């Protein structure tokens, strides 16, 4: 039974806890103020990566009145910048990838987000343990209270002549995104994993014929996936074939002897392949080649700080975007070994933004704190002036 004495004891204890917590929070932010007083380098939410994931997270943190900086990185805009038409993001019908990003950038900048065209060089936990120190390639030092990693994953490249030249002119890495480019065409798919087979399945309704080029004697894909290939009459599999070059059609000679003056930009017309055993070289006619040879998550910089899986994908806690290190969150392809879709990256990044907001609120960050800390914020003056 509760008597008067125990109730007042309980109330006093509660008040003491609240007081101690307030002191801890005050000390937490006092310390940050001292560190960033002269450098004006405080960033409550630092988002690393400016693709769909990074920009989606920024919408949420900025709308929660948290000063947010998005570091654009080596590939501003991420993978969508290289996608031809985006047709599979809910609400987006046949819009060029770069336009989707352009719109998202405008959206976040209108919300007050600062875009910083720089790249992380190093990142470490401050010795006091209450924030992160990020050094950039342009010699900035930022003090971040939270970080959202949204650096994506890069599709592995064949690294053969013609690959760069014909990117988006026959050479694609995302069958789900660019399957319509294969309509009525002879298509090659490179790879022997589950993604390669899945690519074939996405392309099958569109392509006239598909040749799957596997470099080894067998596929790495699961047997169940390999079984699925059998139902397509217009799919052939060639083993032990390496792509050594992607080529354009030889210029058509007009009867007069003059060159074809078609001003359309060049488009590939075939892949040169070489057999692994007998080294025989052949030209395979193909107007499109979809390269599906795996991805590399861009997590190298963060792997010492946060837990990653055997392939470098950042590991998350349950159905959250929390990494193994409190205060650091991650979203998008850098966490996703399987789906790698813009819509999914966006959704996960929204969750990462919400997780970062909850973390800061939990640390006592409030509208009042934000006002107190505002003079210490890092602001990207150059961009501000441009706007
Ligand atoms: P994987 O790493 O599983 O496979 C990559 C494939 O590409 C291998 O067959 C590899 O050949 C081949 N390869 C690598 N480099 C070259 C090159 N230069 N030239 C030609 N071929 C090359 O990657 P995936 O993206 O296929 O799959 C990633 C993960 O996602 C896997 O765990 C997979 O199971 C999973 N996944 C599952 C799906 C499903 O279950 N529906 C769908 C898609 C992915 P080699 O074998 O000779 O090394």
Image: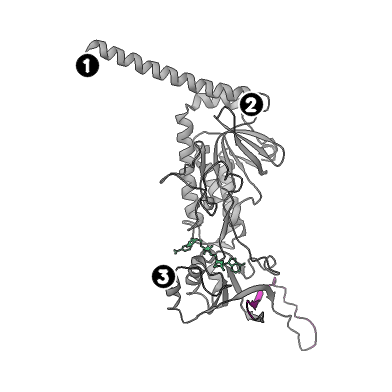
Answer with the quarter of the image where residue 254 lies: bottom right
Q: Is residue 259 above or below residue 370?
A: below
Neighbourhood count class around disc 2 (C-alpha, 10 Å): few under 14, some 14–19, many 20 upward: many
Q: Which residue is mark 2?
A: 36
Whole-percent x, y for residue 5 in the image: 26, 10
N-terminal-most mark, 2 or 3: 2
Whole-percent x, y for residue 144 in the image: 58, 34
Left or right: residue 248 versus residue 257 is left
Q: Which residue is mark 1?
A: 2
Neighbourhood count class around disc 3 (C-alpha, 10 Å): few under 14, some 14–19, many 20 upward: few
Queried whether the magenta region covers residue 326, the answer comes back as no
Q: CA distance from mark 2 to mark 3?
A: 56 Å
Q: Which residue appears farthest toward the front when viewing the image?
A: 277
For the point 55% across and 64% down, the residue is 174
User: As rendered, which of 179 and 65 lies closer to the eye?
Assistant: 179
N-terminal-most mark, 2 or 1: 1
Q: Tag 2, which secondary structure?
A: helix
The magenta segment is 256-277
For the point 43% across and 73% down, the residue is 228
Queried on whether the Cβ of the residue with tag 3 lies below 8 angstroms from ligand 1, the answer reads yes
Queried whether the magenta region covers residue 260, the answer comes back as yes
For the point 64% across and 73% down, the residue is 243
N-terminal-most mark, 1 or 3: 1
Image mark for residue 224 = 3
Q: Which residue appears farthest toward the top when viewing the image?
A: 5
């Amino acid at each position: 039974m509760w008597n008067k004495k125990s109730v007042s004891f309980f109330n006093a204890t509660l008040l003491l806890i609240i007081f101690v917590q307030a002191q801890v929070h005050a000390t937490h932010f006092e310390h940050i103020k001292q560190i960033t007083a002269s450098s004006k380098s405080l960033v409550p939410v630092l988002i690393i990566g400016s693709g769909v994931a990074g920009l989606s997270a920024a919408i949420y943190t900025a709308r929660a009145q948290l000063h947010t900086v998005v570091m654009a990185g080596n590939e501003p805009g991420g993978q969508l910048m290289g996608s031809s038409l985006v047709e599979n993001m809910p609400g987006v019908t046949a819009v060029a990838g770069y336009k989707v990003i352009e719109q998202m950038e405008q959206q976040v900048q209108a919300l007050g987000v600062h875009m910083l065209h720089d790249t992380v060089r190093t990142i470490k936990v401050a010795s006091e343990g209450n924030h992160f120190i990020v050094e950039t390639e342009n010699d900035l030092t930022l003090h971040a209270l939270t970080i959202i990693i949204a650096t994506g994953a890069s599709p592995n490249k064949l690294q053969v002549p013609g690959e760069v030249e014909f990117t988006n002119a026959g050479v694609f890495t995302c069958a789900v995104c660019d399957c319509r480019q294969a309509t009525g065409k002879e298509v090659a798919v490179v790879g022997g994993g589950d993604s390669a087979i899945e690519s074939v399945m996405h392309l099958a309704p569109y392509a006239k014929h598909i040749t799957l080029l596997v470099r080894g004697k067998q596929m790495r894909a699961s047997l169940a996936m390999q079984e699925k290939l059998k139902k397509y009459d217009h799919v052939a599999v060639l083993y032990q074939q390496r792509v050594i070059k992607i080529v354009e059609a030889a210029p058509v000679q007009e009867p007069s002897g003059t060159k074809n003056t078609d001003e359309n930009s060049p488009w590939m017309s075939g892949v040169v392949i070489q057999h692994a055993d007998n080294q025989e070289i052949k030209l395979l006619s193909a107007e499109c080649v979809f390269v599906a040879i795996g991805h590399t998550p861009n997590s190298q910089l963060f792997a010492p700080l946060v837990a990653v899986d055997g392939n470098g994908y950042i590991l998350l806690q349950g159905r959250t975007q929390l990494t193994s290190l409190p205060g650091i969150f991650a979203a998008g392809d850098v966490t996703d070994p399987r789906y790698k879709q813009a819509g999914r990256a966006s959704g996960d990044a929204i969750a990462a933004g919400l997780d970062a907001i909850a973390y800061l609120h939990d640390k006592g960050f409030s509208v009042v704190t934000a006002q107190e800390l505002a003079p210490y914020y890092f602001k990207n003056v150059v961009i501000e002036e441009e706007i």
